[in-house]
Image (cartoon, grey):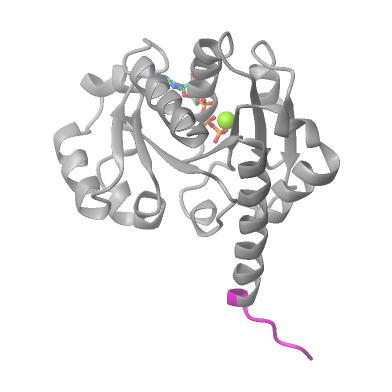
């Protein structure tokens, strides 16, 4: 019998992530890893983001899902450069999946200026796996409740931006935006926080401007 520790596997993931970061750097691609609970609004926000940014930039998407390609279908109107990964049950994406796409299966992803990854809907596992992204973004919808950042801190701690989504529902749910902002600042004082709604478009422009500023910084 052999025992192999999970920490060794995570070490291997770190090496693959570093390889991805190097390749993306060489091609000047900004990679954005989006994570959050099932249904928090990742694809809806991507639809609105691609709609606004696709006239200006070459965009690509890696869609992570357990089984279907439904989210990839939703994004097709804005870019033809979409690769669906079906994990067949696994709850997160790993760096070597992305590395395989970039170097072997879909190298044309490297022609993009911004490469978005929609991670598997899950507030726990994706946070453990660096994919080699430039920026990690965690979504929290107002319908999930104020306790989620405190209960699932890693996803909010190890992230560069926190998007509080479905802002249009704020009046109908038991969610205190001020309290959430304070809690999130305690967990992660460096992260920027963008409250927004994919439905009304409120806050989406600000988020898109921020992405553009990251791209400009990367190109310097
Ligand atoms: N009212 C409102 N509903 C939203 C908003 N964003 C998303 N939704 C709804 O929330 C549900 C889930 O949205 P998705 O964008 O599919 O969520 P997701 O995070 O991609 O879900 P998974 O990929 O399954 O993890 C859908 O019914 C959306 O229409 C929003 O800003 N406001
Ligand atoms: Mg989705």
Q: Taking 177 as reference, is 124 left or right?
A: right
Q: Position of residue 29 (x, y in %)?
A: 61, 35
Q: Taking 201 as reference, is 88 left or right?
A: right
Q: Is residue 146 magenta?
A: no
The mark total stands at 0
Q: Position of residue 31 (x, y in %)?
A: 57, 38
Residue 93 visible in this rendered orientation of the protein? no
Q: Quadrant of the N terminus?
A: bottom right
- The one nearer the camera, 1 or 131, is 131
Q: Position of residue 102 (x, y in %)?
A: 75, 42
Q: For residue 85, which quarter of the picture?
A: top right
Query: Which residue lies most toward the front here?
Result: 220
Q: Position of residue 58 (x, y in %)?
A: 64, 19
Name the residue: 80% across, 36% down: 107
Q: Taking 125 as reference, is 13 left or right?
A: right
- The one nearer the camera, 22 or 211, is 22
Q: Mostly what secondary structure, the magenta segment?
A: loop
Name the residue: 67% across, 10% down: 77
Q: Which residues are magenta?
A: 1-7
């Amino acid at each position: 019998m052999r025992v192999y520790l999970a920490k060794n596997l995570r070490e291997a993931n770190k090496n693959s992530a570093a390889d991805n970061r190097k390749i993306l750097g060489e091609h000047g691609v900004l990679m954005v890893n989006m994570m959050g609970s099932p249904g928090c609004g990742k694809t809806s926000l991507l639809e609105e983001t691609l709609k606004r940014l696709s006239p200006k930039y070459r965009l690509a998407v890696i869609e992570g899902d357990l089984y279907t390609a439904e989210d990839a279908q939703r994004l097709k109107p804005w870019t033809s450069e979409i690769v669906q990964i079906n994990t067949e049950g696994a709850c997160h994406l790993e760096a070597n999946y992305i590395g395989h796409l970039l170097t072997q299966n879909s190298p044309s992803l490297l022609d993009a200026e911004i490469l978005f990854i929609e991670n598997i809907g899950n507030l726990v596992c994706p946070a453990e796996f660096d994919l080699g992204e430039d920026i990690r973004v965690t979504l929290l919808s107002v319908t999930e409740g104020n306790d989620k950042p405190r209960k699932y801190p890693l996803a909010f701690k190890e992230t560069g931006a926190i998007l509080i989504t479905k802002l249009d529902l704020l009046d109908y749910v038991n969610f205190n935006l001020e309290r959430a902002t304070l809690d999130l600042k305690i967990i992660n004082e460096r992260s920027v926080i963008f409250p927004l709604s994919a439905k009304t478009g409120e806050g989406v422009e600000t988020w898109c401007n921020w992405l553009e500023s990251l791209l400009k910084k990367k190109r310097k």
